[in-house]
Amino acid sequence: MDASLYAVTPLNLLGALLLVLGAAFLLLGGLGLVRMPDVFNRIQAGTKATTLGTLLSLAGMGCLRPDWGLKLLLIGLFILFTNPLSSQVLARAAHRVGLKKSPLTQVDRLAEDTGEAP
């Protein structure tokens, strides 16, 4: 066991705080998946919250384990590039197959761009 991991230092406290914040954002992202009215809002809520939550968690682990810094940075960059891209592809696919939007949705920019809007 690494005894320095359990020592109370400012870096360990910052790491623990970042881990708690990351877990909170991940929890809120999961809650957003349940509470949002349609698939498009769920995709947005899930992607934004989980991206931030995961990056905060990785930063917290970087504070707790500085020797893992490069690996955590590479994982963070991968997530930063792939999460928004995958959500955009999922949203376009959902739009293309005609999934229903919430009645609260007032603007559909993709339909306007492709000429499908009334």
Image (spheres, grey):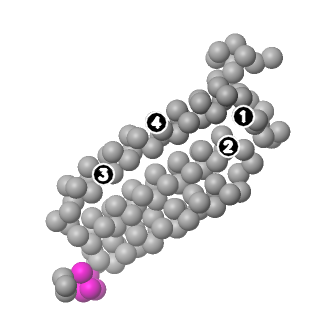
Of circles 1 and 3, the one toward us is 1
Mark 2, secondary structure of its residue: helix
What amino acid is at disc 3? Answer: Ile
Mark sitting earlier along the chain (2/1): 2
Q: CA distance from mark 3 to mark 4?
A: 16 Å
Which residue corresponds to mark 2?
39
**What span is colored magenta in the figure?**
5-9
- Circle 2/circle 1 CB separation < 8 Å: yes
State which quadrant residue 11 falls in: bottom left
Instruction: Check the image and name the residue furthest to the right.
Output: 103
Q: Residue placed at 26% from the left, 53% from the top?
A: 73
Which residue corresponds to mark 3?
75
Residue 107 versus residue 117 in the image, above or below: below
Res 85 label:
4
In percent of width and height, residue 21 lies at: 47, 67
Q: Decide whether residue 6 is among the magenta residues.
A: yes
Q: CA distance from mark 4 to mark 1?
A: 20 Å
- Circle 2/circle 4 CB separation < 8 Å: no
Query: Tag 3: Cα neighbours inside 10 Å, few (<14), some, or many (≥20)?
Result: some
